[in-house]
Image (tube, rainbow, N blue to C red):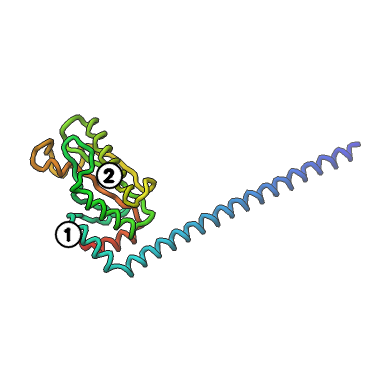
Amino acid sequence: MMRNLKALALGAAGAVMLSGCATKGYVNKNVAAGVATERSERIAADSATGRDVAALRADLNTLRNDLNTLRTEFGAKITAMEEGVKFAFPVHFAFDDATVRPQDQAALDRFAQVVGKYYGGAQITVEGFADPAGSTRYNMGLSKRRADAVRAYLATKGLTEAQLRTIGYGESRQVRPGAAANEEGAELNRRVVFVVETPGDVAAVTAMAAGSQ
């Protein structure tokens, strides 16, 4: 009887050990599969980035011409940043208003064309700003409404709302410190700025095409 009990105990222990090994093997296979998938995705992303950079370099003269048009016709300032490329150009707003003005639509149209042509799939942040008139809380909301209005306009020009996000910075980062309402330079504080998030290499090629600014 005792011998049978020992045999059963040994058999149960062996079954547990085998079960543990099987589970461990299953987990290891899952981990390996996850690592392989992540590696494949990373390689694919790196390959896509490489193709984007190669395409931009091959089309450098065309890119340079398009960026120069933004600079010369619309006064754009194009800067390579760690997270991408910043486009700042005169898209301003009337006092206490969040409506896209007719005189700014041509600049936005051109910006949408350049983004669609060279930065397809990039995440674009529309940053809104206000002059210091009014309360800080009110200006935060007003600047966000301005960014939202620009996003809605760009969405009618071929960019998707999914790739456009907005943020309001209120009266921070003033171009003309203290200028508000109808004071000289106040309009410069009522503006939007665009940050196009691209890989560093793409931003570098853009900076090369735009020239030092």
Q: Is residue 117 left or right of residue 15?
A: left
**In the rendering, at what x and y percent does residue 98 appear?**
23, 38
Secondary structure beneath label 2: helix
Q: Quick one: which residue is furthest to the right in this view? A: 1
Q: Quadrant of residue 177?
A: top left
Label 1, label 2: how far apart the Cα atoms are? 22 Å
Q: Is residue 140 left or right of residue 181?
A: right
Residue name at image x 61 percent, y 51 percent: 30
Q: Is residue 56 left or right of residue 45?
A: left
| Quadrant of the frame with the C terminus | bottom left
Q: Is residue 157 left or right of residue 94?
A: right
Q: Which residue is mark 2?
A: 150
116 or 130: nearer the viewer:
116
Q: Which mark is residue 101?
A: none
Identify which amino acid the numbered label 1 is placed on: Thr
Q: Quadrant of residue 8?
A: top right
1 or 21: nearer the viewer:
21
Residue name at image x 13 percent, y 40 percent: 186
Q: Which residue is mark 1?
A: 72
Identify which amino acid the numbered label 2 is placed on: Val
Residue name at image x 32 percent, y 68 percent: 57
**In the rendering, at what x and y percent does residue 179 appear?**
11, 39
| Quadrant of the frame with the N terminus | top right
Residue density around tag 1, few if under 14, some if 14–19, many if 20 or more, within 10 Å: few
